[in-house]
Image: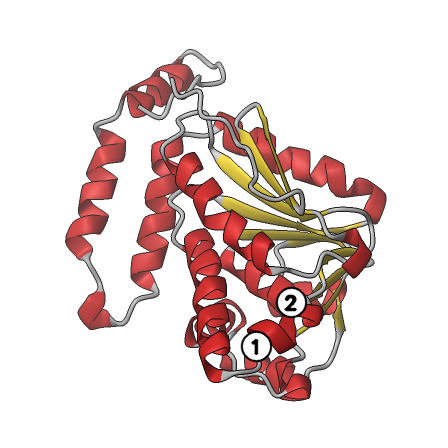
Amino acid sequence: MSTVSYDSPTERVQTWLDASTLHIRFNNPARHNALSVDMWEAVPPLLAQAETDDRVRLVVFSGAGEKAFVSGADISQFEDMRAAREAVTRYEHMAENALMSIHNFSKPTLSCIRGFCIGGGVNVAISCDIRIASTDSVFSIPAARLGLGYRYSAMKNLVDLIGPGAAKDLFFTARKIDAHEAKSLGLISRACAPDELPALLAEYTSALAANAPLTVRAGKAITAEILKPSPELDLDLCQRLIRGCFDSADYAEGRKAFMEKRKPAFTGK
């Protein structure tokens, strides 16, 4: 079994492994967890480590404190990083690399949101598979107010999640919405009172720890294939993933546990 250590390259990103869940917490509370360059850069190597770590079945992203998940990009760095054309290109590549590392991660990812989830925070959240939030959370994509260009991948993720009509509504107006509206649009999966958020998160971590990893990962990969344009759809990959589940020891264990009326002990093999 892998004994990889999850040491963040910056104190603004905290990491710890709790049983089968890797936690990645954005830790910039003085700026409501606004994403600085070092925070963006910390994400891909952490996920690359988790990709091959058999202990990890779920990665949870959260924000330090109770005021914000992520309040957007760190505007104090805009003049240096997002003014000149070359600087903008470098910054966009760095942010894209971080977000795509989340989006393309083969294991389940979850954003646990409390407070402000703005701009880049929404991008992080919609790059994840599941989003849960406290009812005091606020969501907004203020690009139109700032005159920022919005990446194709970010817009596609938003449209895939909530549809073109709702995506254009939020993007064109840059308005803020609460957790209730976010849930009604499909932007988040579930919402609960702030003091109930830890219990809701525990519900997910427990479920992912208990369920068959190969089946979950295959479901994630096949969902990604379904969302591709038809010419790019890899049905052979889908079939290989499905066969891999049925050929696995976990499938045999699941059947056996069902017959024996007990909880299965899945290993991801």
- Observer-nearest of 124 and 196: 124
Give the residue furthest to the top. Answer: 260
- Observer-nearest of 112 and 13: 13
Q: Determine whether, in the image, residue 214 is placed left or right of residue 230.
A: right
SS class, disc 2:
loop
Asked if the residue at tag 2 contacts the one at tag 1, i.e. Cβ–Cβ closer than 8 Å, the answer is yes
The amino acid marked with disc number 1 is: Arg
Give the residue furthest to the left. Answer: 236
SS class, disc 1:
loop
Q: Position of residue 94 (x, y in %)?
A: 46, 63
Q: Residues within 10 Å of mark 2 (few under 14, many from 20)?
A: many
**Res 187 visible:** no
- Which residue is denoted by mark 2 in the rendering? 73
Split into 4 quadrants, where in the image is the N terminus? top left
Up/down of 191 relative to 108, above or below? below
Residue name at image x 59 percent, y 53 percent:
39
Q: Which mark is residue 82?
A: 1
- Observer-nearest of 77 and 2: 77
Residue name at image x 56 percent, y 59 percent:
124
Q: Position of residue 155 (x, y in %)?
A: 48, 75
- Observer-nearest of 29 and 60: 29
Q: Residues within 10 Å of mark 1 (few under 14, many from 20)?
A: some
Residue name at image x 55 percent, y 33 percent:
7
Locate residue 245: give its quadrant.
top left
Q: Position of residue 198 (x, y in %)?
A: 74, 38
